[in-house]
Amino acid sequence: MKAMLVGFVAIAVIAVGADYTLDQMGWSAAEQGASSSSVRLGN
Amino acid sequence: MRDIRHFILGCIVAALAFIGLVSSLTPGMVNAQEAGSVAPQTEIDRSATGGAPTLEDIMRRQQGLPVDNSERAANVGDPSGAANLSDQLGTLGGASDPDLWRGMRFNEADVTTQVRGPAAEVLIQDRGMWWLQFREGPLLTYGGYLLLGTIGLLALFFLIRGRVKIDGEKTGRRIERFKNFERFGHWLLAGSFIVLGITGLVSLMGRKFMIPVMGHESYALIAGASKWVHNNVSWAFMLALVMIFVMWVVHNFPDKTDLKWLAMGGGLFGGGHPPAKKFNAGQKLIFWSTIVLGASISVSGISLLFPFELPLFAKTFAILNSTGLPEMFGFGILQETMTPHEEMQYAQLWHAIVSFVLMSIILAHIYIGSLGMEGAYDAMGSGMVEEQWAKEHHSLWVEEVKEREGKAPSGATPAE
């Protein structure tokens, strides 16, 4: 039972840690395919 | 006798699901190719519209049927035949405004943008509709049926077979089956998988089933939270998958006892309990299903977490085409060039299909590890199992444990 609870707590800790780490890296999925502004078409 | 059931049920359901989903995917792939440049089955006279869509085209599109866009897709201007820039009417370089818009419509326009990114130059992605229709249609429907069918079969099995009891008399003695760190790894994997399963289903099915009940605004809140949880809990799942693999792979290589176990149907149909080591053949199949399908879900998940950075499918399809297998099985030649968005669409479908299969297997695993068998939960609950249970289901493992205990100096006394 203890191992199960520790496992569940670890899931939460890893999730928050992953979010924080990826945030610190500054990588944004949203910026990969969408343009925020200033798109110039053609020549 | 015990784990054969979750293995058999899992295999049947997984096989049915796979056949259903793959057969559904086939027309989707064909449509995707037809929607691009391959002519559809019926020839339509477009002379009256000069190649532009006719009423019949519009009706076919509304019915979700393939439409022959090849003439329009190719009609995007001819810069080489253009009048010189200094000549009269030469300023557009041989392409009229309609040519330019058609070029954008079919992703043939020469787009340049200041925005940097793998997909920034794709303004209109032509083949997204079949993905959307497949996602909201067969994927959601068959995936849902697979999960409900698995739960129904398990309920039926429980009604017919009842709970598997410990046959012999309980001894009251307990044997350590799994150590703390093994159970921690198991629950890390199990907990994260359940959370990922629920949040994944919210993302896939919420639009259809939750919005009508709770409205758009409430669902938007739940969907946003689901997305955050799904993206970030995935790392716990991947970590646990590696942990489980490292801890238990040595116990899960097939051996001769598995043949006997399988030949006896795990004892399900009578004939006593077949001998088994730490993991019986049914558990080994669950282990390898989890590792292989879990790894596949993880790879496609990473591809989705970092959009356009890890395209998987064009290259995979090219390799498959080179083997000739897709044509042999009637899939035709698979698509080898894709826009970045198409890569993501295939990754999403694969991620969901494999997840559905693994979910159905794990549902059976959860059943047999809790409600379905007396004494099974203790293995992952306290880690200590009833000796009689262990003798019935893992007799060879019990012998190994006893042998180790016999060799180990109990209350070790230092050498004098």
Image: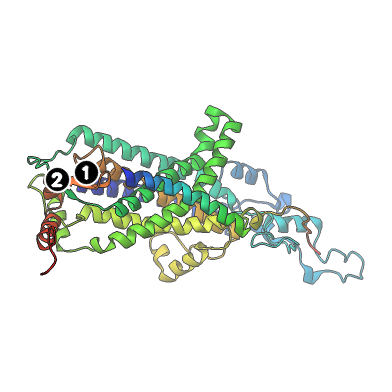
Q: Position of residue B283 (x, y in %)?
A: 24, 53
Say which residue appears at 51% left-offset and 37% top-offset: B206
Mark number, residue B376: 1
Mark number, residue B389: 2
Which quarter of the picture shows residue B207? top right
Q: Residues within 10 Å of mark 2 (few under 14, many from 20)?
A: many
**Looking at numbered disc 1 in the image, what kind of residue is underneath it?**
Ala
Say which residue appears at 37% left-offset and 51% top-offset: B189
Which quarter of the picture shows residue B143? top left
In depth, the one of B199 and B241 nearer the eye is: B241
**Looking at numbered disc 2 in the image, what kind of residue is underneath it?**
Trp
Indicate which disc, 1 or 2, sits on the residue closer to the N terminus.
1
Q: Is B156 above or below relative to A13?
A: above
Disc 1 to disc 2: CB gap under 8 Å: yes
Q: Is residue A10 left or right of residue B288?
A: right
Q: Is residue B279 visible?
A: yes
